[in-house]
Image (tube, rainbow, N blue to C red):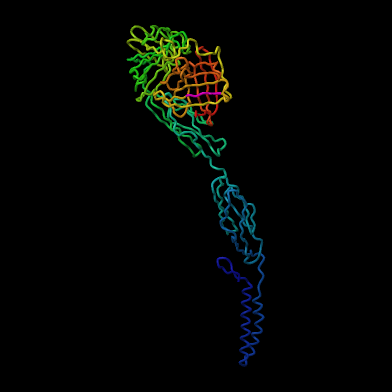
Amino acid sequence: MVKRSADTYFYSPSFFYSQIWRNKSKFIYSLNEKNKDGDMKIKHLLFMFVAMPLLFAACEQKPAPDNIEPTYAPELTLTSEATMEFTAEGGEGTITYTAEMVEVTRTEESPAPEAECDAEWITIKTTDFEKCSFEVSANDGEARETTIVVKYVDKSFEVVVKQTAKANDEPEPVLTLTTEDTLSFTADGGTGAIGYTIENAIEGFDPTATCEAEWITDITIAETITFTVAANEGEAREATIVVSYGEQSFEVAVKQEAKPAEEPTTIEFTANHFDGEYYGDYYSPGIGNYYLHLSDNGFQESGYALPNSTYYRIDLYSDYFSGSEVEYLQLPYGTYTLDLNNTFAHGTFSAAYSKLLGSDAEGEFIVEKQFEAGELIVNEEGATLKVTIEGKEHTVTYKGATLVADKRSSTGEDVGGGEDIIPEDKLSTLTEDYTVVLDDHMLIYANYGDYYSTGLNNWTFAIWPNDYEGDHIQFDIMNQSSSEMFGEYSVGDENTAFSFFKGFIEDDGSGTVGYMSGSWYYTDDGVTMAPFVGGNLRISNAGGGNIRVDFTVTDDNGNTITGNWTGTPQALQ
Protein backbone atom coordinates (compact mmCIF):
# COMPACT_ATOMS: atom_id res chain seq x y z
CA MET A 1 0.00 0.00 0.00
CA VAL A 2 1.45 3.37 -1.02
CA LYS A 3 0.47 6.58 0.80
CA ARG A 4 -0.26 9.68 -1.32
CA SER A 5 -1.06 13.26 -0.58
CA ALA A 6 -4.33 14.15 1.14
CA ASP A 7 -4.12 10.78 2.99
CA THR A 8 -5.50 8.81 0.03
CA TYR A 9 -4.51 5.10 -0.23
CA PHE A 10 -4.06 3.42 -3.59
CA TYR A 11 -4.16 -0.44 -3.94
CA SER A 12 -2.12 -2.40 -6.45
CA PRO A 13 -2.76 -6.00 -7.80
CA SER A 14 0.16 -7.37 -5.81
CA PHE A 15 -1.68 -6.36 -2.63
CA PHE A 16 -4.59 -8.57 -3.49
CA TYR A 17 -2.27 -11.52 -4.33
CA SER A 18 -0.53 -11.23 -1.02
CA GLN A 19 -3.86 -11.38 0.78
CA ILE A 20 -4.78 -14.57 -1.02
CA TRP A 21 -1.54 -16.31 -0.16
CA ARG A 22 -1.87 -15.25 3.46
CA ASN A 23 -5.39 -16.85 3.58
CA LYS A 24 -4.15 -20.00 1.89
CA SER A 25 -1.56 -20.54 4.59
CA LYS A 26 -4.19 -20.17 7.25
CA PHE A 27 -6.31 -22.76 5.44
CA ILE A 28 -3.53 -25.38 5.28
CA TYR A 29 -2.73 -24.81 8.92
CA SER A 30 -6.34 -25.50 9.78
CA LEU A 31 -6.37 -28.80 7.93
CA ASN A 32 -3.31 -30.03 9.68
CA GLU A 33 -4.80 -29.22 13.06
CA LYS A 34 -7.88 -31.28 12.29
CA ASN A 35 -5.83 -34.30 11.17
CA LYS A 36 -4.40 -34.45 14.66
CA ASP A 37 -7.85 -35.11 16.15
CA GLY A 38 -8.71 -38.21 14.28
CA ASP A 39 -9.79 -39.61 11.11
CA MET A 40 -11.13 -37.34 8.59
CA LYS A 41 -12.97 -38.39 5.69
CA ILE A 42 -10.48 -39.16 2.94
CA LYS A 43 -12.82 -37.93 0.35
CA HIS A 44 -12.83 -34.54 1.95
CA LEU A 45 -9.07 -34.43 1.98
CA LEU A 46 -8.82 -35.59 -1.58
CA PHE A 47 -11.40 -33.10 -2.54
CA MET A 48 -9.31 -30.36 -1.05
CA PHE A 49 -6.14 -31.39 -2.82
CA VAL A 50 -8.01 -31.58 -6.08
CA ALA A 51 -9.55 -28.19 -5.50
CA MET A 52 -6.35 -26.39 -4.49
CA PRO A 53 -4.79 -26.26 -7.96
CA LEU A 54 -7.99 -24.92 -9.28
CA LEU A 55 -7.95 -22.23 -6.59
CA PHE A 56 -4.37 -21.24 -7.39
CA ALA A 57 -5.15 -21.17 -11.03
CA ALA A 58 -8.06 -18.88 -10.39
CA CYS A 59 -5.93 -16.40 -8.34
CA GLU A 60 -3.10 -15.77 -10.87
CA GLN A 61 -2.81 -12.03 -12.04
CA LYS A 62 -3.85 -11.28 -15.55
CA PRO A 63 -1.71 -8.87 -17.58
CA ALA A 64 -3.31 -5.50 -18.31
CA PRO A 65 -4.69 -5.22 -21.76
CA ASP A 66 -2.71 -3.01 -24.15
CA ASN A 67 -5.64 -0.69 -24.81
CA ILE A 68 -6.05 0.36 -21.08
CA GLU A 69 -4.60 3.93 -20.41
CA PRO A 70 -2.34 4.10 -17.30
CA THR A 71 -3.44 6.28 -14.40
CA TYR A 72 -1.12 8.98 -12.87
CA ALA A 73 -1.29 11.37 -9.93
CA PRO A 74 0.75 14.68 -10.00
CA GLU A 75 2.76 15.67 -6.96
CA LEU A 76 4.25 19.27 -6.55
CA THR A 77 5.99 20.38 -3.36
CA LEU A 78 7.74 23.78 -2.70
CA THR A 79 11.08 23.22 -0.96
CA SER A 80 12.42 26.82 -0.87
CA GLU A 81 11.04 29.94 0.83
CA ALA A 82 7.58 31.13 -0.12
CA THR A 83 8.74 34.77 -0.06
CA MET A 84 11.99 35.95 -1.69
CA GLU A 85 13.43 39.46 -1.23
CA PHE A 86 15.84 41.38 -3.44
CA THR A 87 17.67 44.70 -3.18
CA ALA A 88 17.15 47.51 -5.68
CA GLU A 89 20.13 46.26 -7.70
CA GLY A 90 18.14 43.14 -8.62
CA GLY A 91 19.77 39.75 -9.33
CA GLU A 92 18.98 36.10 -9.95
CA GLY A 93 16.76 33.83 -7.91
CA THR A 94 15.91 30.14 -7.78
CA ILE A 95 12.73 28.47 -6.57
CA THR A 96 13.23 24.83 -5.63
CA TYR A 97 10.51 22.16 -5.43
CA THR A 98 9.71 18.55 -6.28
CA ALA A 99 7.40 17.87 -9.19
CA GLU A 100 6.55 14.31 -10.19
CA MET A 101 3.78 12.18 -11.66
CA VAL A 102 3.14 9.09 -9.61
CA GLU A 103 1.83 6.25 -11.83
CA VAL A 104 -1.15 4.47 -10.46
CA THR A 105 -1.13 1.64 -12.99
CA ARG A 106 2.20 2.03 -14.79
CA THR A 107 5.01 4.54 -15.47
CA GLU A 108 5.21 6.86 -18.40
CA GLU A 109 7.07 10.18 -19.08
CA SER A 110 5.72 13.07 -16.94
CA PRO A 111 4.88 16.56 -18.37
CA ALA A 112 7.27 19.44 -17.38
CA PRO A 113 6.32 22.07 -14.73
CA GLU A 114 5.64 25.65 -15.83
CA ALA A 115 6.31 29.03 -14.19
CA GLU A 116 4.81 32.40 -14.98
CA CYS A 117 4.88 36.02 -13.69
CA ASP A 118 3.00 39.09 -14.90
CA ALA A 119 5.65 41.63 -13.74
CA GLU A 120 7.90 42.97 -16.48
CA TRP A 121 10.81 43.21 -14.09
CA ILE A 122 10.83 39.43 -13.52
CA THR A 123 12.31 37.23 -16.26
CA ILE A 124 11.76 33.44 -16.03
CA LYS A 125 14.92 31.78 -17.28
CA THR A 126 14.55 28.00 -16.81
CA THR A 127 12.04 25.58 -15.31
CA ASP A 128 12.55 21.85 -14.69
CA PHE A 129 11.33 19.19 -12.23
CA GLU A 130 13.43 20.53 -9.38
CA LYS A 131 13.75 24.27 -9.70
CA CYS A 132 12.73 27.47 -11.47
CA SER A 133 15.40 30.12 -12.03
CA PHE A 134 14.53 33.74 -12.71
CA GLU A 135 16.13 37.20 -12.91
CA VAL A 136 15.08 40.39 -11.13
CA SER A 137 15.82 43.67 -12.93
CA ALA A 138 17.39 46.62 -11.11
CA ASN A 139 14.89 48.94 -9.45
CA ASP A 140 15.20 52.69 -10.16
CA GLY A 141 12.03 53.61 -8.32
CA GLU A 142 9.95 52.74 -5.30
CA ALA A 143 9.79 49.36 -3.56
CA ARG A 144 7.77 46.76 -5.48
CA GLU A 145 6.30 43.25 -5.14
CA THR A 146 4.96 40.52 -7.42
CA THR A 147 4.17 36.77 -7.48
CA ILE A 148 5.66 33.86 -9.46
CA VAL A 149 3.23 30.97 -10.00
CA VAL A 150 4.66 27.48 -10.55
CA LYS A 151 2.22 24.94 -12.07
CA TYR A 152 2.45 21.20 -12.51
CA VAL A 153 -0.54 19.70 -14.23
CA ASP A 154 -3.37 20.68 -11.88
CA LYS A 155 -1.10 21.46 -8.94
CA SER A 156 0.46 24.91 -8.28
CA PHE A 157 2.00 27.15 -5.67
CA GLU A 158 2.95 30.84 -5.45
CA VAL A 159 6.21 32.53 -4.42
CA VAL A 160 6.17 36.20 -3.47
CA VAL A 161 9.09 38.28 -4.80
CA LYS A 162 9.81 41.60 -3.07
CA GLN A 163 12.34 44.27 -4.15
CA THR A 164 13.44 47.33 -2.19
CA ALA A 165 13.45 50.88 -3.57
CA LYS A 166 16.58 52.34 -5.10
CA ALA A 167 18.89 53.65 -2.41
CA ASN A 168 19.47 57.40 -2.55
CA ASP A 169 23.26 57.57 -2.74
CA GLU A 170 23.28 61.24 -3.74
CA PRO A 171 23.21 63.68 -0.80
CA GLU A 172 20.24 65.99 -0.64
CA PRO A 173 20.74 69.55 -1.99
CA VAL A 174 21.03 72.25 0.68
CA LEU A 175 19.80 75.79 -0.08
CA THR A 176 21.24 78.52 2.18
CA LEU A 177 20.62 82.28 2.36
CA THR A 178 23.96 84.13 2.69
CA THR A 179 22.72 87.72 2.94
CA GLU A 180 20.30 89.48 5.29
CA ASP A 181 16.76 88.13 5.47
CA THR A 182 15.38 91.67 5.48
CA LEU A 183 16.34 94.27 2.87
CA SER A 184 15.31 97.91 3.28
CA PHE A 185 14.92 100.58 0.64
CA THR A 186 14.18 104.27 0.62
CA ALA A 187 11.18 105.65 -1.17
CA ASP A 188 13.36 106.15 -4.25
CA GLY A 189 13.62 102.40 -4.74
CA GLY A 190 16.63 100.80 -6.36
CA THR A 191 18.23 97.45 -7.06
CA GLY A 192 18.56 94.69 -4.49
CA ALA A 193 20.60 91.50 -4.34
CA ILE A 194 20.05 88.23 -2.49
CA GLY A 195 23.01 85.95 -1.91
CA TYR A 196 22.62 82.19 -1.66
CA THR A 197 24.49 78.90 -1.95
CA ILE A 198 23.36 75.44 -3.05
CA GLU A 199 25.29 72.44 -1.81
CA ASN A 200 24.95 69.17 -3.73
CA ALA A 201 23.23 70.98 -6.59
CA ILE A 202 21.51 68.90 -9.26
CA GLU A 203 22.84 69.57 -12.74
CA GLY A 204 20.38 71.42 -14.92
CA PHE A 205 18.11 72.26 -12.00
CA ASP A 206 17.99 75.97 -11.09
CA PRO A 207 16.41 77.77 -8.14
CA THR A 208 13.32 79.90 -8.54
CA ALA A 209 12.47 83.27 -7.02
CA THR A 210 8.97 84.69 -6.91
CA CYS A 211 7.25 87.73 -5.46
CA GLU A 212 3.60 88.68 -5.62
CA ALA A 213 4.21 92.42 -5.19
CA GLU A 214 3.89 94.39 -8.42
CA TRP A 215 6.44 96.95 -7.25
CA ILE A 216 9.20 94.35 -7.20
CA THR A 217 10.21 93.43 -10.75
CA ASP A 218 13.09 92.18 -12.92
CA ILE A 219 13.89 89.23 -10.64
CA THR A 220 16.97 87.64 -12.18
CA ILE A 221 18.64 84.44 -10.98
CA ALA A 222 22.39 84.06 -11.42
CA GLU A 223 25.17 83.69 -8.86
CA THR A 224 23.07 86.17 -6.90
CA ILE A 225 19.40 86.98 -7.24
CA THR A 226 18.82 90.57 -8.25
CA PHE A 227 15.61 92.53 -8.38
CA THR A 228 14.31 96.07 -8.85
CA VAL A 229 12.25 98.03 -6.34
CA ALA A 230 10.10 100.75 -7.88
CA ALA A 231 9.88 104.23 -6.40
CA ASN A 232 7.23 104.54 -3.71
CA GLU A 233 4.69 107.29 -4.11
CA GLY A 234 2.63 106.32 -1.07
CA GLU A 235 2.83 104.74 2.36
CA ALA A 236 5.53 102.41 3.61
CA ARG A 237 5.17 98.91 2.22
CA GLU A 238 6.58 95.42 2.54
CA ALA A 239 6.70 92.27 0.42
CA THR A 240 8.34 88.85 0.45
CA ILE A 241 10.56 87.18 -2.13
CA VAL A 242 10.45 83.37 -1.93
CA VAL A 243 13.50 81.50 -3.21
CA SER A 244 13.02 77.75 -3.78
CA TYR A 245 15.14 74.81 -4.84
CA GLY A 246 13.26 71.56 -4.97
CA GLU A 247 11.51 71.12 -1.64
CA GLN A 248 13.74 73.68 0.11
CA SER A 249 13.08 77.42 0.28
CA PHE A 250 13.70 80.60 2.23
CA GLU A 251 12.05 84.01 2.36
CA VAL A 252 13.51 87.51 2.20
CA ALA A 253 11.45 90.46 3.41
CA VAL A 254 11.68 93.63 1.32
CA LYS A 255 10.71 96.85 3.10
CA GLN A 256 10.37 100.27 1.54
CA GLU A 257 9.94 103.62 3.23
CA ALA A 258 7.02 105.89 2.50
CA LYS A 259 7.46 108.84 0.20
CA PRO A 260 8.81 111.67 2.34
CA ALA A 261 6.95 114.89 2.69
CA GLU A 262 7.96 117.52 0.21
CA GLU A 263 10.83 119.56 1.56
CA PRO A 264 11.13 123.20 0.59
CA THR A 265 13.72 123.92 -2.05
CA THR A 266 14.26 127.38 -0.62
CA ILE A 267 14.96 128.29 2.99
CA GLU A 268 14.41 131.75 4.40
CA PHE A 269 16.47 132.59 7.48
CA THR A 270 16.41 135.81 9.47
CA ALA A 271 19.68 136.58 11.22
CA ASN A 272 19.27 138.53 14.43
CA HIS A 273 22.99 138.82 15.05
CA PHE A 274 25.95 139.98 12.97
CA ASP A 275 29.41 139.18 14.37
CA GLY A 276 32.62 139.96 12.53
CA GLU A 277 36.39 140.16 13.05
CA TYR A 278 39.08 141.80 10.96
CA TYR A 279 42.51 140.09 10.71
CA GLY A 280 44.28 142.47 8.32
CA ASP A 281 46.20 140.86 5.49
CA TYR A 282 47.93 138.20 7.57
CA TYR A 283 46.22 135.39 5.67
CA SER A 284 46.03 137.19 2.29
CA PRO A 285 48.86 139.65 1.63
CA GLY A 286 47.54 143.06 0.58
CA ILE A 287 43.93 141.97 0.98
CA GLY A 288 41.89 142.39 4.15
CA ASN A 289 40.42 139.26 5.72
CA TYR A 290 37.02 139.58 7.44
CA TYR A 291 35.64 136.64 9.45
CA LEU A 292 31.81 136.92 9.72
CA HIS A 293 28.89 135.07 11.33
CA LEU A 294 25.19 135.61 10.64
CA SER A 295 23.16 133.82 13.33
CA ASP A 296 19.89 133.66 15.19
CA ASN A 297 21.33 133.83 18.73
CA GLY A 298 24.90 135.13 18.51
CA PHE A 299 27.73 133.95 20.79
CA GLN A 300 28.50 133.73 24.47
CA GLU A 301 30.71 136.48 25.95
CA SER A 302 33.57 133.98 25.87
CA GLY A 303 33.11 133.66 22.11
CA TYR A 304 31.70 130.13 22.20
CA ALA A 305 28.55 129.07 20.37
CA LEU A 306 25.21 129.14 22.17
CA PRO A 307 23.08 125.98 22.44
CA ASN A 308 20.60 125.14 19.67
CA SER A 309 21.78 127.91 17.41
CA THR A 310 22.40 128.33 13.68
CA TYR A 311 25.44 130.12 12.23
CA TYR A 312 26.31 131.06 8.65
CA ARG A 313 30.09 131.55 8.63
CA ILE A 314 31.68 133.72 5.92
CA ASP A 315 35.47 133.97 5.34
CA LEU A 316 35.51 137.19 3.30
CA TYR A 317 38.32 139.10 1.48
CA SER A 318 38.00 142.82 0.75
CA ASP A 319 39.74 146.16 1.27
CA TYR A 320 42.90 146.15 3.36
CA PHE A 321 42.85 148.62 6.25
CA SER A 322 46.38 149.33 7.52
CA GLY A 323 45.73 152.13 9.96
CA SER A 324 46.16 152.04 13.72
CA GLU A 325 44.18 149.53 15.69
CA VAL A 326 40.62 150.54 16.38
CA GLU A 327 37.81 148.81 18.19
CA TYR A 328 35.56 148.34 15.17
CA LEU A 329 35.74 148.74 11.40
CA GLN A 330 32.96 149.05 8.86
CA LEU A 331 32.70 146.01 6.65
CA PRO A 332 33.23 147.35 3.12
CA TYR A 333 29.99 147.56 1.15
CA GLY A 334 29.70 145.54 -2.02
CA THR A 335 28.83 142.19 -3.54
CA TYR A 336 31.03 139.18 -2.80
CA THR A 337 30.94 135.77 -4.51
CA LEU A 338 31.84 132.31 -3.25
CA ASP A 339 35.34 131.25 -4.35
CA LEU A 340 35.34 127.50 -4.87
CA ASN A 341 39.07 127.58 -5.70
CA ASN A 342 39.99 129.30 -2.43
CA THR A 343 42.26 131.89 -4.01
CA PHE A 344 41.41 134.41 -1.24
CA ALA A 345 40.99 137.05 -3.91
CA HIS A 346 39.46 140.48 -3.30
CA GLY A 347 35.66 140.46 -3.53
CA THR A 348 35.29 136.77 -2.61
CA PHE A 349 34.58 134.53 0.34
CA SER A 350 36.34 131.17 0.48
CA ALA A 351 34.58 127.84 0.16
CA ALA A 352 37.15 126.24 2.46
CA TYR A 353 36.17 128.21 5.57
CA SER A 354 32.65 129.39 4.79
CA LYS A 355 29.91 127.01 5.94
CA LEU A 356 26.63 126.42 7.75
CA LEU A 357 27.01 125.40 11.40
CA GLY A 358 24.44 124.19 13.90
CA SER A 359 24.86 123.54 17.64
CA ASP A 360 23.18 121.05 19.95
CA ALA A 361 21.78 121.53 23.45
CA GLU A 362 25.33 121.59 24.84
CA GLY A 363 26.50 124.24 22.40
CA GLU A 364 28.58 121.72 20.41
CA PHE A 365 28.54 121.95 16.64
CA ILE A 366 26.73 118.95 15.23
CA VAL A 367 25.87 120.40 11.80
CA GLU A 368 28.56 121.44 9.34
CA LYS A 369 27.66 121.92 5.68
CA GLN A 370 29.69 123.53 2.93
CA PHE A 371 28.44 126.22 0.57
CA GLU A 372 28.14 125.09 -3.05
CA ALA A 373 27.49 128.49 -4.63
CA GLY A 374 26.46 131.92 -3.45
CA GLU A 375 26.94 135.64 -2.96
CA LEU A 376 26.86 138.17 -0.14
CA ILE A 377 25.52 141.71 -0.54
CA VAL A 378 26.54 144.28 2.09
CA ASN A 379 24.98 147.77 2.13
CA GLU A 380 23.71 150.46 4.47
CA GLU A 381 20.68 148.34 5.45
CA GLY A 382 22.63 145.31 6.46
CA ALA A 383 23.65 142.10 4.70
CA THR A 384 21.91 139.48 2.55
CA LEU A 385 23.51 136.10 1.99
CA LYS A 386 22.26 133.78 -0.75
CA VAL A 387 23.94 130.38 -0.88
CA THR A 388 23.24 126.90 -2.16
CA ILE A 389 23.64 124.05 0.35
CA GLU A 390 22.91 120.47 -0.68
CA GLY A 391 20.94 121.75 -3.65
CA LYS A 392 18.69 124.06 -1.62
CA GLU A 393 18.68 127.82 -1.83
CA HIS A 394 19.25 129.58 1.50
CA THR A 395 18.47 133.26 1.81
CA VAL A 396 19.82 134.82 4.99
CA THR A 397 18.72 138.37 5.78
CA TYR A 398 20.22 140.67 8.39
CA LYS A 399 19.07 144.22 9.06
CA GLY A 400 21.44 146.41 11.03
CA ALA A 401 25.01 147.63 11.36
CA THR A 402 27.80 145.56 9.82
CA LEU A 403 30.76 146.46 12.03
CA VAL A 404 33.69 144.09 12.61
CA ALA A 405 36.09 143.96 15.56
CA ASP A 406 39.75 144.77 14.83
CA LYS A 407 41.72 141.62 15.68
CA ARG A 408 44.94 142.46 13.85
CA SER A 409 47.00 142.45 17.03
CA SER A 410 46.26 138.73 17.51
CA THR A 411 48.10 138.03 14.26
CA GLY A 412 51.20 140.00 15.13
CA GLU A 413 50.50 142.81 12.71
CA ASP A 414 51.85 146.25 13.74
CA VAL A 415 48.78 148.25 14.58
CA GLY A 416 50.56 150.70 16.86
CA GLY A 417 51.79 149.87 20.37
CA GLY A 418 51.00 146.17 20.50
CA GLU A 419 53.05 143.78 22.62
CA ASP A 420 53.39 141.13 19.93
CA ILE A 421 56.37 140.99 17.62
CA ILE A 422 55.33 142.48 14.31
CA PRO A 423 57.33 141.08 11.38
CA GLU A 424 57.31 143.54 8.51
CA ASP A 425 58.16 140.90 5.91
CA LYS A 426 56.76 137.49 5.08
CA LEU A 427 57.66 134.73 7.48
CA SER A 428 58.28 132.09 4.81
CA THR A 429 61.76 131.86 3.35
CA LEU A 430 60.65 129.52 0.55
CA THR A 431 60.67 130.91 -2.96
CA GLU A 432 58.97 127.98 -4.69
CA ASP A 433 56.87 124.88 -4.05
CA TYR A 434 58.55 122.28 -1.90
CA THR A 435 58.13 118.55 -1.20
CA VAL A 436 59.28 117.42 2.22
CA VAL A 437 60.93 113.98 2.31
CA LEU A 438 60.18 112.26 5.63
CA ASP A 439 61.65 108.79 5.06
CA ASP A 440 63.93 108.66 8.10
CA HIS A 441 61.80 110.55 10.60
CA MET A 442 59.88 109.98 13.83
CA LEU A 443 56.58 111.46 14.96
CA ILE A 444 56.24 112.82 18.52
CA TYR A 445 52.81 113.89 19.76
CA ALA A 446 51.12 115.35 22.82
CA ASN A 447 47.48 115.80 23.83
CA TYR A 448 46.63 118.89 25.90
CA GLY A 449 42.96 118.08 26.39
CA ASP A 450 40.48 120.95 26.37
CA TYR A 451 43.32 123.47 26.48
CA TYR A 452 41.24 126.38 25.17
CA SER A 453 38.05 125.47 27.11
CA THR A 454 36.11 125.10 23.89
CA GLY A 455 34.98 121.51 24.42
CA LEU A 456 37.55 120.36 21.86
CA ASN A 457 40.83 118.51 22.27
CA ASN A 458 44.10 120.23 21.38
CA TRP A 459 46.89 118.06 19.93
CA THR A 460 50.36 118.94 18.71
CA PHE A 461 52.74 116.72 16.83
CA ALA A 462 56.11 117.12 15.16
CA ILE A 463 57.84 114.97 12.55
CA TRP A 464 61.58 115.15 13.15
CA PRO A 465 64.61 113.48 11.54
CA ASN A 466 65.94 110.58 13.60
CA ASP A 467 69.31 112.38 13.70
CA TYR A 468 67.61 115.77 14.23
CA GLU A 469 69.25 117.15 11.09
CA GLY A 470 67.16 118.25 8.12
CA ASP A 471 63.50 118.99 7.52
CA HIS A 472 61.02 119.34 10.39
CA ILE A 473 57.21 119.54 10.35
CA GLN A 474 54.85 120.55 13.15
CA PHE A 475 51.06 120.86 13.39
CA ASP A 476 48.82 122.30 16.09
CA ILE A 477 45.35 120.74 15.64
CA MET A 478 41.88 120.64 17.21
CA ASN A 479 39.49 117.66 17.18
CA GLN A 480 36.76 116.02 19.25
CA SER A 481 38.72 112.99 20.47
CA SER A 482 40.97 112.55 23.46
CA SER A 483 42.33 109.20 22.21
CA GLU A 484 43.18 109.59 18.53
CA MET A 485 44.08 112.18 15.88
CA PHE A 486 42.47 110.50 12.84
CA GLY A 487 40.59 112.88 10.53
CA GLU A 488 40.85 115.47 7.80
CA TYR A 489 41.86 118.99 8.85
CA SER A 490 41.91 122.47 7.35
CA VAL A 491 42.93 125.86 8.71
CA GLY A 492 40.77 127.07 11.59
CA ASP A 493 40.84 128.14 15.21
CA GLU A 494 40.28 126.75 18.70
CA ASN A 495 36.52 126.73 18.13
CA THR A 496 36.63 124.55 15.04
CA ALA A 497 36.89 120.78 15.17
CA PHE A 498 39.27 119.16 12.69
CA SER A 499 41.22 122.33 12.09
CA PHE A 500 44.87 123.28 12.40
CA PHE A 501 46.25 126.61 13.53
CA LYS A 502 48.08 128.80 11.06
CA GLY A 503 51.75 129.29 11.77
CA PHE A 504 52.72 132.48 13.59
CA ILE A 505 55.44 133.94 15.81
CA GLU A 506 54.44 134.21 19.44
CA ASP A 507 56.11 136.70 21.79
CA ASP A 508 58.17 135.15 24.56
CA GLY A 509 57.50 138.18 26.76
CA SER A 510 60.68 140.09 25.90
CA GLY A 511 59.14 142.06 23.09
CA THR A 512 62.09 141.24 20.85
CA VAL A 513 62.19 137.45 20.60
CA GLY A 514 59.45 134.99 19.70
CA TYR A 515 58.98 131.33 18.87
CA MET A 516 57.10 129.50 16.16
CA SER A 517 53.55 128.56 17.17
CA GLY A 518 50.87 126.84 15.17
CA SER A 519 51.78 124.80 12.09
CA TRP A 520 55.16 125.09 10.34
CA TYR A 521 57.88 123.68 8.11
CA TYR A 522 61.47 124.44 9.16
CA THR A 523 65.02 123.10 9.12
CA ASP A 524 67.23 122.35 12.10
CA ASP A 525 69.54 125.32 11.33
CA GLY A 526 66.62 127.76 11.62
CA VAL A 527 67.44 129.29 8.24
CA THR A 528 64.61 127.81 6.20
CA MET A 529 61.03 128.07 7.43
CA ALA A 530 57.46 128.49 6.24
CA PRO A 531 54.23 128.96 8.20
CA PHE A 532 51.20 126.98 7.01
CA VAL A 533 48.35 129.39 6.31
CA GLY A 534 46.12 127.22 4.11
CA GLY A 535 45.61 123.75 2.68
CA ASN A 536 44.68 120.37 4.11
CA LEU A 537 46.01 117.74 6.51
CA ARG A 538 44.91 114.12 6.70
CA ILE A 539 45.74 111.61 9.46
CA SER A 540 44.62 108.00 8.92
CA ASN A 541 45.00 104.59 10.52
CA ALA A 542 47.65 102.51 8.73
CA GLY A 543 47.04 99.40 10.86
CA GLY A 544 49.29 97.57 13.26
CA GLY A 545 49.57 100.60 15.54
CA ASN A 546 50.82 102.79 12.67
CA ILE A 547 49.37 106.01 11.30
CA ARG A 548 49.76 107.86 8.01
CA VAL A 549 50.08 111.62 7.70
CA ASP A 550 49.46 113.39 4.37
CA PHE A 551 49.50 117.14 3.88
CA THR A 552 49.22 119.66 1.07
CA VAL A 553 49.49 123.17 2.53
CA THR A 554 50.41 126.70 1.46
CA ASP A 555 52.70 129.27 3.06
CA ASP A 556 52.33 133.02 3.24
CA ASN A 557 54.26 133.39 -0.03
CA GLY A 558 51.74 131.24 -1.88
CA ASN A 559 54.06 128.23 -2.16
CA THR A 560 52.64 124.72 -1.90
CA ILE A 561 54.31 122.36 0.57
CA THR A 562 53.54 118.60 0.38
CA GLY A 563 54.68 115.48 2.16
CA ASN A 564 53.64 112.25 3.87
CA TRP A 565 54.84 109.98 6.65
CA THR A 566 53.88 106.50 7.86
CA GLY A 567 55.01 104.89 11.08
CA THR A 568 54.38 104.35 14.77
CA PRO A 569 53.72 107.59 16.67
CA GLN A 570 55.49 108.21 19.99
CA ALA A 571 53.96 110.10 22.89
CA LEU A 572 55.97 113.00 24.24
CA GLN A 573 57.67 111.95 27.48
Indicate yes or no whether the magenta region holds residue 420.
no
Residue numbers of the magenta segment: 460-464
Image-based side of 232 in relation to 2, left or right: left
Q: Quadrant of residue 34?
A: bottom right
Q: Where 437 sits versus 5, above or below?
A: above
Q: Where 463 sits versus 338, above or below?
A: below
Q: Position of residue 463 (x, y in %)?
A: 53, 23
Q: Position of residue 331 (x, y in %)?
A: 38, 9
Q: Residue at x 59, y 57 (%)?
A: 151
Which of the two residues, 9 or 37, is positioned nearer the viewer here?
9
Q: Quadrant of residue 313?
A: top left
Query: Which quadrant does the N terminus fall into?
Result: bottom right
Determine the main secondary structure of the stretch shown in magenta.
strand
Which of the two residues, 512 or 51, is positioned nearer the viewer here?
512
Q: Position of residue 505 (x, y in %)?
A: 47, 16
Which of the two residues, 391 or 68, is positioned nearer the viewer here?
391
Q: Is residue 233 visible?
A: no
Image-based side of 513 in relation to 439, left or right: left
Q: Quadrant of residue 27?
A: bottom right
- Number of on-image labels: 0
Q: Position of residue 484 (x, y in %)?
A: 47, 28
Which of the two residues, 465 or 537, is positioned nearer the viewer here?
465
Q: Is residue 239 visible?
A: yes
